[in-house]
Image (cartoon, rainbow, N blue to C red):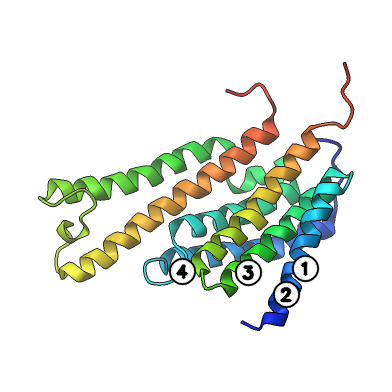
Amino acid sequence: MIWELELVIYIFLALSAIVALEVKDLLVAVVMMTIFSFLMALLFVAMGAIDVGFTEAVIGAGVTGILFVVVVYQTSRKSKD
Amino acid sequence: MRRQFHSPIVLLGARLLSPYIMVFGWYVIIHGHYSPGGGFQGGALLAASVLLIRVAGGRRIARLQIQEFATTPLAVIGVLIYFATGLVAMAMGGYFLDYGALPIPGMDPDWLRYTGILIIEVGIGLAVMAILVMIYDNMVKGEDYA
């Protein structure tokens, strides 16, 4: 693959990981993790592992995001007791 | 879940997108034996198309699509397809999952292997879809669910 494009993807990968770790809002963290997963899938495909990239895109960017959103909406930031 | 409000635009987008995801999931399952993908990825795509409607529409609309009590029998049917294929091959004198021994008349052994993998993939896809939807349902339902 074109190495400039891969460099851009790597930079965005690191940025999304740092934002997902440092941000205060949990919903933003979930979206950032979804972006991380999708960029990871692009890198897997670029490295030639198409099956791994397919699984990563479907599971990491699709189903896991939905499940994390459900978890975030079922918890509250401050405890009540 | 927390407070829900109705957004017709989100529901329209989900309704527009969901059938195409489902068709692509079946494509991945059916073509799984000679191209990337397979039962697990196709089943996860089917589950994604079902979960999209569930997230966008809420419980009342989700009841129209796949009801909550239907997920466990679907998963069991998927597992049964898998094991029935393997055990039928075993009963006909081959090994477990030895597709060449399947008793389908009028087929060469290579076409039998082709078809056997296809049957297995359909079973795996059904099981994966049903179990991912079941996980979502049980997470939404609350904590006191065994």
Q: What is the crowding at mark 3: few (fewer than 14 residues within 10 Å), some, or many (at least 20)? A: some
Nearest to viewer (mark 3 / mark 4) = 3
Q: Nearer the viewer, residue B103 or A17?
A: A17
Labels 1 and 4 share a subunit? no
Residue at (45, 46) in percent of width and height: B127
Q: Are marks 1 and 3 in contact (CB under 8 Å)?
A: no
Identity, as a three-letter code, of the amino acid under mark 2: Leu
Q: Which residue is mark 3?
A: A43
Q: Are marks 2 and 1 in contact (CB under 8 Å)?
A: yes
Could you give the CA–CA distance between mark 2 and mark 3, rounded to whole angstroms?
10 Å
Q: Which residue is mark 2?
A: A7
Identity, as a three-letter code, of the amino acid under mark 3: Leu
Q: Which residue is mark 4?
A: B36
Could you give the CA–CA distance between mark 3 and mark 4, rounded to whole angstroms?
16 Å
Labels 2 and 4 share a subunit? no
Q: How many marks?
A: 4
Could you give the CA–CA distance between mark 1 and mark 3, rounded to whole angstroms?
12 Å
- Which of the labelled discs sits on residue A48, or is there none? none
Q: What is the crowding at mark 2: few (fewer than 14 residues within 10 Å), some, or many (at least 20)? A: few
Q: Which residue is mark 1?
A: A11
Q: Residue furthest top?
A: A81
